Amino acid sequence: MNKLTPSNLSTAGHLPKLEALEGQLALRLTAHLSRGAQALPHDISERLRFSRERALASRRAVAMPSTAPVVLAFGRAATLGGDTPSFWLRLVSALPLLVLAAGLVFIQHHHELQQIAVAVEIDSALLADDLPPAAYGDPGFSEFLRNGDAP
């Protein structure tokens, strides 16, 4: 059984069929309501007309804010746009960038501290050893290490 669900609408190609069914339902519903409105007595239809006009007038009287966000689409990206973004919106938009920059600075600082700690460990091992540091540069030292001769 092939049921229409939101997950398989786009994959099964049923979206145009669903839109056609919605259109047919809308036409039937409006025709039924129009027939019912014609069958109403004159005083009721006048009260309905007056109520409709009042509702439309009150809707027109409500002023839409001029700074309402508008969704702008550029290709596959959608952004909120408007007249002029506020200071707080700009600050909050820049906050992730600032957190990222601070994180990168912290990572670099931590990495440098680790390198310094490794260098200190190597230097302290060299200085605490029985051999002088100049011995490590001697060409015969590698032979000494291979033979394992102890002094």
Image: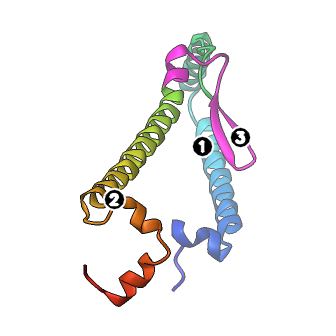
Do labels 3 and 2 touch, CB within 8 Å?
Answer: no
Residue name at image x 43 percent, y 40 percent: 103
Please state the horizontal and vertical placement of residue 61, each as a whole percent of the image: 60, 10
Q: Residues within 10 Å of mark 1 (few under 14, many from 20)?
A: few
The disc label shown at residue 122, or none: 2
Figure check: 9 above or below 68: below
Residue 50 inside the magenta-drawn segment: no
Q: Which of the 4 quarters of the picture holds residue 150?
A: bottom left
**Residue beneath label 1, please?**
33
Task: Say what secondary structure mark 1 lies in.
Answer: helix
Q: Earlier in the sequence, mark 3 or mark 2?
A: 3
The disc label shown at residue 73, or none: 3
Q: Which stretch appears magenta? A: 71-91
Q: Residues within 10 Å of mark 3 (few under 14, many from 20)?
A: few
As drawn, is 119 to the left or to the right of 43?
left
The disc label shown at residue 143, or none: none
Amino acid at pointer 1: Leu
Q: CA distance from mark 3 to mark 2?
A: 58 Å
Q: Residue 90 or 69: which is nearer the viewer? A: 90
